[in-house]
Image (tube, grey):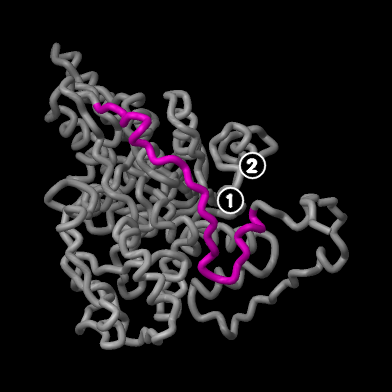
């Protein structure tokens, strides 16, 4: 079919919809409005649309990569909430983010200051400045001693950063708002690929020095073991998405997992979703600001991936995005999600937080949708993480009191036809205020008799299946990759 140049009507098909603050009541309303205006507000709205698609894809494992001073910057609980409410499945950050979180888990605080503070005076008081924020270096030293003592207590062998962060998380778990502690409690793997480049590394250097001085063997952090472990997560995921705040090592570390598995001889399965907020730009050649399109030349992202990047300060952009994707869902939202093949909503173990069921809806009972076999009898324990944290599900299918299903409704037939696939989706929680998607079964790192984790055989790796999905709302996410003005051919 011959192509033709876009007409004026083609180029003016989508008008700007001016932000209406009179009807904007929530963070979700604001970010939804951003999707239809201009500049970085629109790019932030597109990031939200990409994340909605990734986080509501039942076969997608979402990797979060965080860099920068996000914990001192006041975003500690925002990051923790992404883990607590099941918005991400794997966490990769700089060591500083993990360390500052560990520091606050002990009840220590960061303090407001000024970029114009007297830094020599601050040093006299043992106060460390992060732009306009302070931390207490004397309390850092106490954390250093505790981390070094933790290392002293371990068997002298090599550990992945994930293993060591889990041990730190066991300590930090006492603080319910701790990112490291919540990852431990929820069984979410937390990697810090450049752990030595942080205060955790400083503490481990002390451990190493003291052990060598005493003629004893120290532990070691094996960064290649990290590669091997995170590759297994990628290989066992039918689809993957990435969400980057900042760039640096976490961004490249997650992106390159696709290349690692290809070099190991496994089928191509590039990341299908990608969103980033950053203040870096591509023209300086750095990884933090490089576009996802550039990464496509490396094979890291699928040619049809849904991608968006926004140039915005993380302290502004991250709360808006997390607030948008964790919006409360009403009955109409649930119906829309179900029609996108997210077909099974079950209650999690958190009964005090979950929506209660008073019984099977009468208009669903005759279609046998009101009750399902307990998940633990079919798939075993569902929750990832150590065995004590795993809870089996014994609840009915979710039937919202206000959710009416008519006799002719296509939704009922859709659910009935796909009941087996529903179980495979493993969608678990509808809470007041947060839709918690724990989509992916726990990845058990396989080990043979030598005790070294091994990758699965190629036959065990799910092949990539590109299944088109619609956005949760009216935003045309495809415009992220199919720009109106990029010369795309239009059929005449």
| Residue 189 shown in magenta | no
In terms of image quadrants, where is residue 4?
bottom right
Q: Which residue is mark 1?
A: 307
Of labels 1 and 2, earlier in sequence is 2
Compared with residue 252, is residue 312 higher up or lower down, i.e. above or below? below
Can residue 195 be seen here? The reply is yes
| Residue 478 shown in magenta | yes
Q: Residue at x 74, y 69 (%)?
A: 14
User: In terms of secondary structure, where does tag 1 sit?
Assistant: strand
The quadrant of the rendering that contains the C terminus is: bottom right
Q: Nearer the viewer, residue 372 or 328?
A: 372
User: In terms of secondary structure, where does tag 2 sit?
Assistant: helix
Main SS, magenta region, reads loop
Going by the image, does 47 lie left or right of 485?
left
Compared with residue 333, is residue 98 higher up or lower down, i.e. above or below? above
In terms of image quadrants, where is residue 461?
top left
Going by the image, does 459 lie left or right of 243?
left
Q: Which residues are magenta?
A: 453-480
Q: Marks 1/2: CA distance?
A: 9 Å
Q: Which residue is mark 2?
A: 293
Position of residue 477 measured from the top left corner of the image (x, y, whole percent)? 60, 60
């Amino acid at each position: 079919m011959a192509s033709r140049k876009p007409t004026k009507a083609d180029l003016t098909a989508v008008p700007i919809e001016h932000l209406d603050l009179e009807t904007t009541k929530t963070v979700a309303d604001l970010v939804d409005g951003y999707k239809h205006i201009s500049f970085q507000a629109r790019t932030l709205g597109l990031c939200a649309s990409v994340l909605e698609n990734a986080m509501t894809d039942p076969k997608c494992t979402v990797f979060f990569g965080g860099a920068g001073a996000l914990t001192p910057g006041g975003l500690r609980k925002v990051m923790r909430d992404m883990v607590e409410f099941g918005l991400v499945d794997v966490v990769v950050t700089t060591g500083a983010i993990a360390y500052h979180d560990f520091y606050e888990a002990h009840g220590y605080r960061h303090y407001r200051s000024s970029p114009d503070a007297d830094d020599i005076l601050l040093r006299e008081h043992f106060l460390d400045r992060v732009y306009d924020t302070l931390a207490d270096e004397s309390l850092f030293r106490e954390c250093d001693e505790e981390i070094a003592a933790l290392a002293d207590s371990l068997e002298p062998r090599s550990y992945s950063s994930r293993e060591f962060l889990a041990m730190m998380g066991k300590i930090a778990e006492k603080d319910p708002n701790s990112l490291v502690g919540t990852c431990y409690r929820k069984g979410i793997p937390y990697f810090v690929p450049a752990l030595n480049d942080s205060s955790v590394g400083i503490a481990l250097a002390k451990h190493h020095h003291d052990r060598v001085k005493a003629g004893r063997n120290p532990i070691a952090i094996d960064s290649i073991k990290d590669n091997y472990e995170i590759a297994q997560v990628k290989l066992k995921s039918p689809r993957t998405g990435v969400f980057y705040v900042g760039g640096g090592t976490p961004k490249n570390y997650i992106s390159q997992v696709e290349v690692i598995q290809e070099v190991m001889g496994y089928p191509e399965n590039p990341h299908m979703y990608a969103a980033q907020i950053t203040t870096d730009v591509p023209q300086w050649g750095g990884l933090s600001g490089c576009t996802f399109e550039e990464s496509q030349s490396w094979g890291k992202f699928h040619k049809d991936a849904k991608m968006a990047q926004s140039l915005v300060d993380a302290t502004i952009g991250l709360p808006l995005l997390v607030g948008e994707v964790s919006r409360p869902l009403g009955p109409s939202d649930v119906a829309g999600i179900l029609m996108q093949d997210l077909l099974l909503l079950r209650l999690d173990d958190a009964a005090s937080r979950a929506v209660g069921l008073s019984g099977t809806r009468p208009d669903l009972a005759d279609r046998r949708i009101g009750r399902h076999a307990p998940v633990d009898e079919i798939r075993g324990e569902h929750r990832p993480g150590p065995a004590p944290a795993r809870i089996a599900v014994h609840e009915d299918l979710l039937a919202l009191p206000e959710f009416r299903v008519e006799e002719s409704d296509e939704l009922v037939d859709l659910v009935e036809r796909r009941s087996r696939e529903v179980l495979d989706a493993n969608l678990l929680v509808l809470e007041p205020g947060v839709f918690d998607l724990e989509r992916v079964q726990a990845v058990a790192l396989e080990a043979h008799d030598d005790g070294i984790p091994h990758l699965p055989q190629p036959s065990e790796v799910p092949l990539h299946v590109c299944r088109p999905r619609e956005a949760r709302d009216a935003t045309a996410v495809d415009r992220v990759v199919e720009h109106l003005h990029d010369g795309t051919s239009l059929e005449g």
